[in-house]
Amino acid sequence: MFRTIFLLLLANIFMTFAWYWHLKFKQEALWKVIVISWFIAFIEYCLQVPANRWGYGIFTASQLKILQEAITLVIFFAFAVFYLGEAMKWNHLVSFLFLFLAVYFMFRG
């Protein structure tokens, strides 16, 4: 279980960077950031696929997906604040709360 969660955390760190790192570098050519993002995303796939394979059976597919989404939100929140310098507003936090409620209900018996 912990191996799956750890790999999902690492995978989401790489995927968040693959999708959003270039927003600070608007002057770079689009083709360059696409190529770099694909290389970063490759690492994400090398982590995400084993996480799902090893986690399936411990978790259902639906639980794996909602867990991955919750982890994505936590990683993205930190990324947006610390890397992009964005401020989190109350409505962002409320939105995250509702998504975490979805995780709660997914894992509820």
Image (cartoon, rainbow, N blue to C red):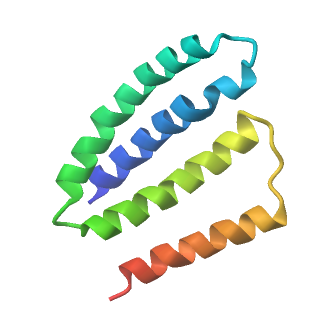
Q: Is residue 100 above or below residue 1?
A: below
* Quadrant location, the N terminus: bottom left
Which residue is at 30% across, 56% downward?
Answer: 2
Q: Position of residue 59 (x, y in %)?
A: 25, 68
Q: Is residue 106 above or below residue 64?
A: below
Q: Position of residue 40 (x, y in %)?
A: 44, 24
Q: Is residue 30 left or right of residue 60?
A: right
Q: Is residue 94 left or right of residue 33?
A: right
Which residue is at the far bottom? 109
Which residue is at 52% across, 20% downward?
Answer: 34
Residue nearer the viewer, 30 or 9: 30
Q: Is residue 17 left or right of residue 65?
A: right
Which residue is at 56% across, 34% downward?
Answer: 19
Q: Position of residue 85 (x, y in %)?
A: 80, 37
Q: Is residue 53 left or right of residue 105?
A: left
* Quadrant location, the C terminus: bottom left
Which residue is at 34% across, 44% downward?
Answer: 7
Q: How many marks?
A: 0
Q: Is residue 16 above or below residue 97?
A: above
Q: Quadrant of residue 39?
A: top left
Q: Quadrant of residue 38?
A: top left
